Amino acid sequence: MASAVIVAAGMGRRMGAGMNKAYLLLCGKTILENTVSVFENCKKINEIIVVTDDTEKCRDLLKDFKKVTAVVLGGKTRQDSVKNGVKACTGEFVAIHDGARALICEKDIERVICEAETHGAAALGVKCKDTLKIADENGFITKTADRNFIYQIQTPQVFKRTEIAKAHENASGEFTDDCAVLEREGKKIKIVEGSYENIKITTPEDLIIAEKILEKRNIK
């Protein structure tokens, strides 16, 4: 069993909505409700902690979710927000997830938690489809990366609670994800093959794509 930390703080400026994108509607419910509902129904999750910039609004929105045990205030950076969320957890393992990844599936949450229980830490990821080039400071190609070993890392990312809490306390500077925080500690993290549908809703175009994916799932 694991705790889930749903990170849903910040304005999401690339969406251009003038508000926290977690509260935008996606197929009749907010993005955040769509995300939390998947973790609510996941048997491997025993509690959900939501990190937000408006705790009162968030608590009211999520009041009917039984597994939501805490709504905590985010920090100045994503890393600060995660730290606040992890502090509110009680589980041996913690699954850290972007609130904007509303298309995550229960089976993928369960798979990555199981791998973390075996290996100590795990994260969802998908192999890169495109050819990647490494460039120098002047923008000239210096190398072609072998895409067989290149992954786009997603969330949830699952860790032992005590290890990720300690890693965040020791970390300085900004990190793009929680795997990077633990990598700094020299820990190995298992990549679990995820789904290309598990997109992070960042721009208005992403919202349209997400609606189409959910509509397709509902038809099935």
Image (cartoon, rainbow, N blue to C red):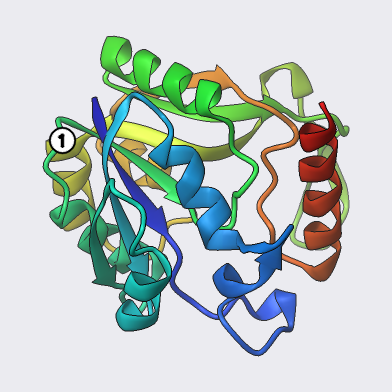
Residue topped by disc 1: 91
Give 27 or 47, whichever is nearer the viewer: 27
Who's the residue at 77% across and 67% down the image?
203
- Which of the 4 image quarters holds residue 45? top left
Q: Is residue 170 visible?
A: no
Q: Position of residue 97 (x, y in %)?
A: 45, 47
Q: Is residue 115 visible?
A: yes
In which quadrant is the C terminus drawn?
top right
Instruction: Answer left or right for 31 relative to 87.
Output: right
Q: Position of residue 95 (x, y in %)?
A: 35, 38
Instruction: Answer left or right for 215 relative to 184.
Output: right
In which quadrant is the N terminus drawn?
top left
Vertical comparison of 163 with 67: above or below = above
Q: Which amino acid, by three-letter code, is at mark 1?
A: Gly
- Which of the 4 image quarters holds residue 63? bottom left
Looking at the image, the residue that sits furthest to the front is 64
Q: Position of residue 108 (x, y in %)?
A: 54, 24
Who's the residue at 31% across and 78% down the image?
55
